[in-house]
Image (cartoon, rainbow, N blue to C red):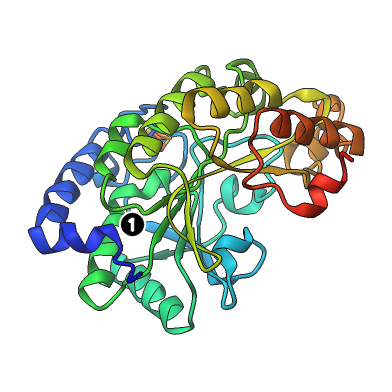
Amino acid sequence: MKFEPSYLKLLKTGEIEERLNKLYKILEKCELCPRKCHVNRLKNEKGICKASLKLKVSSFFPHFGEEDVLVGTNGSGTIFLSNCNLRCVYCQNFEISHLGEGEERTEEEVAEMMLDLQGRGCHNINLVTPTHYAPQLVKAIKIAAENGLKLPIVWNCGGYENVEVIKLLDGIVDIYMPDIKYGDNEAAKKYSFPPVLDYWDRCREAIKEMHRQVGDLKIEKGLAFRGLLIRHLVLPNDIAKTENVLNFIAKEISPNSYVNVMSQYFPYGEVILKPKKYLELNRRITSEEYKKAIEIAVRLGLTRGIEEKQLKRII
Ligand code: SF4
């Protein structure tokens, strides 16, 4: 099968320009995410995510630590964006998301990064924490596509998304890779700063729209080229409400969903700066906690993203 990324069609019809206009317009009174800060980012005002008009990039490189279906033989072409709209207190990339480490880059420079990653044989362009830079990134994709980019775009986001913005990405993103961090609204009230009141509501809405656009993950010769890939990080003391998350995926999205149930949580960021305040998060998960999460996934039939070695842990 000859893969053609969806954004090339929008480029040919000129529709990508219309989407760009709509996306940049949102920056004027920013509602790129459900925080809806209403700051004028076109004038470089900053909201909760602390992003201005200019793209800020922490690093870019062929990444070999992502899911096998993205990594292939030459790596996933990963671009880490600075800042974040969710600002979880335990963020495993605290320096990038909270402290905003990185350098300002133009859309043209980010387009060059995409082409460079393609030239190095990467199998996709993996945009990490892209939500608060959606217009600028779509512009970079357009410039790169005009100059020969033909890799699938992976939208690697935190799941706290404005569904109206996700609709504007229809036909531009090939693979949505959202986290579903929690299966209720309570956790993000405690563990996002400032508190997020409606994580679970907005997340479910956004995931449904993502699945409507791209469907279940499609894989050919071991490589994903289109669809939805969901990540869920198991947290200590069932803070993430894993069963709710997996139930939602199996029953309201698709039992054929590709779900990566992750075990690598470690205390970081504010959790180690204020250990007494976040006592319940101040440890790794136990093997029992992880086993339970995998058992739930298996019971619900969500086995597509579970590797052999994980399955062995429940036998
Ligand atoms: S993207 Fe940033 S500025 Fe815009 S609404 Fe979200 S947090 Fe606020």
- Measured from the top left, where is residue 88 in percent x and y? 63, 35
Residue that appears at 50% across and 32% down: 254
**Would residue 13 be found to the left or right of residue 83 on screen?**
left
| Quarter of the image with the N terminus in it | bottom left
Residue that appears at 87% across and 26% down: 276
Residue that appears at 25% across and 32% down: 29
Residue that appears at 50% across and 47% down: 177
| Quarter of the image with the C terminus in it | top right
Whether residue 263 is situated above or below residue 288 in the rendered picture: below
Whether residue 170 is situated above or below residue 9 in the rendered picture: above
- Measured from the top left, where is residue 50 in percent x and y? 46, 42
Res. 241 visible in picture: no
**Would residue 90 be found to the left or right of residue 23 on screen?**
right
Residue toward you, 247 or 75 = 247
In the figure, residue 131 lies in which quadrant?
top left
Residue toward you, 131 or 234 = 234
- Measured from the top left, where is residue 217 in percent x and y? 48, 49
Residue toward you, 300 or 280 = 300
- Measured from the top left, where is residue 106 in percent x and y? 32, 66
The kind of secondary structure element at disc 1 is: helix
Residue type, label 1: Leu
**Would residue 244 be found to the left or right of residue 175 on screen?**
right
